[in-house]
């Protein structure tokens, strides 16, 4: 008769040693617990394989059946527990992939009627919430501009333009522009999504007749469907805020 116990023992023992190493590593706690359960399972399987091997060596088949039943029952229970714990951990650890983009730079570009383009940057180079620099927006009085906005991740090489993804998912994104004081400049969004709702990657901006100072606020809303209903309605209300930055504004 083939010595199945010896074969199992040869394969299972190295796996048991590897899993034991993982349980004592610097992995996160939930992962160490999973590997600990696996290690316990493989430890019992190694004992089971050893028992089979010994029974095969001494032809103790009747005894082996009686002795093996109890360990196998424990192994079954442990395996079911592991599956439940793993499924629970998997559900808790999954995060939506489209909420994980790092935005380090907001770039606003203003094109004048004669084709001159002025660009202004807000930067958080590490993406840690600490503002590194903000350019003051300088616009001429009583002038119409074509404005575009770009969101960048400058930690990547080459620089990653997140605006392209926003355009692809425009039916769940909305830029909101707020100017203080009201009327210092007017902003009219030009681009629309497939549902005819504003996006905000492009806008017409017109400065007032007299010089003044204020603030130009940029907000990006992420408004995915909720319970099967569209989350984006064209209003700022609802959804989550991906970007909320402000530039000093001067009309001269």
Image (cartoon, rainbow, N blue to C red):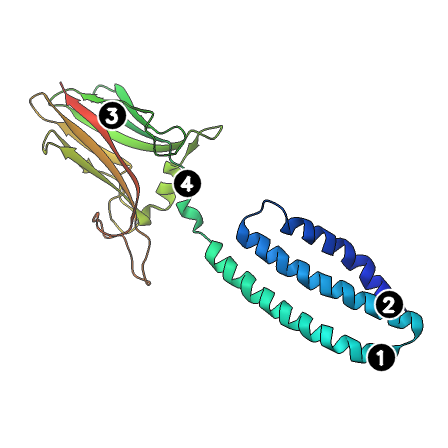
Q: Quadrant of the C terminus?
A: top left
**Location of residue 76 in the rendering, given as x and y in whole percent from the top left corner:** 66, 72
Residue 101, label in figure: 4
Q: Secondary structure at mark 4?
A: loop
Question: Left or right: where does residue 228 sit relative to residue 187?
Answer: right
Q: Residue at position x 68%, y 63% from top?
A: 41
Alpha carbons under labels 1 and 3: distance apart: 87 Å
Q: Earlier in the sequence, mark 1 or mark 2?
A: 2
- Residue of label 3: 110
Looking at the rendering, which quadrant does residue 57 occupy? bottom right
Q: Secondary structure at mark 2?
A: helix
Q: Secondary structure at mark 1?
A: helix
* Callout in the foreground (4, 3): 4
* Callout in the foreground (1, 4): 1
* Callout in the foreground (3, 2): 2
- Residue of label 1: 63
């Amino acid at each position: 008769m083939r010595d199945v116990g010896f074969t199992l023992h040869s394969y299972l023992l190295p796996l048991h040693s590897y899993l034991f190493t993982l349980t004592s590593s610097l992995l996160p706690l939930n992962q160490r617990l999973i590997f600990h359960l696996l290690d316990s399972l493989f430890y019992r399987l190694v004992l089971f394989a050893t028992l089979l091997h010994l029974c095969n060596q001494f032809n103790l088949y009747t005894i082996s059946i009686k002795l093996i039943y109890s360990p196998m029952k424990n192994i079954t229970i442990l395996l079911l527990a592991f599956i439940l714990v793993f499924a629970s951990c998997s559900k808790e650890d999954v995060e939506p992939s489209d909420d994980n983009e790092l935005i380090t730079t907001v770039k606003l570009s203003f094109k004048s009627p004669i084709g001159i383009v002025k660009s202004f940057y807000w930067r958080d180079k590490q993406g840690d919430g600490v503002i590194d620099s903000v350019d003051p927006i300088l616009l001429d009085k009583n002038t119409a501009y074509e404005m575009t906005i770009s969101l960048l991740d400058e930690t990547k090489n080459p620089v990653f333009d997140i605006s392209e993804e926003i355009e692809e998912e425009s039916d769940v994104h909305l830029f909101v522009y707020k100017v203080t004081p009201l009327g210092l400049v007017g902003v009219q969004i030009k681009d629309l999504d497939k549902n005819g709702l504003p996006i905000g990657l492009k806008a017409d901006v017109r400065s007032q007749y007299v010089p003044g100072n204020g603030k130009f606020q940029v907000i990006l809303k992420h408004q995915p469907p909720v319970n099967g209903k569209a989350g984006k309605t064209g209003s700022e209300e609802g959804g989550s805020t991906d970007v909320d930055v402000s530039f000093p504004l001067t009309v001269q």
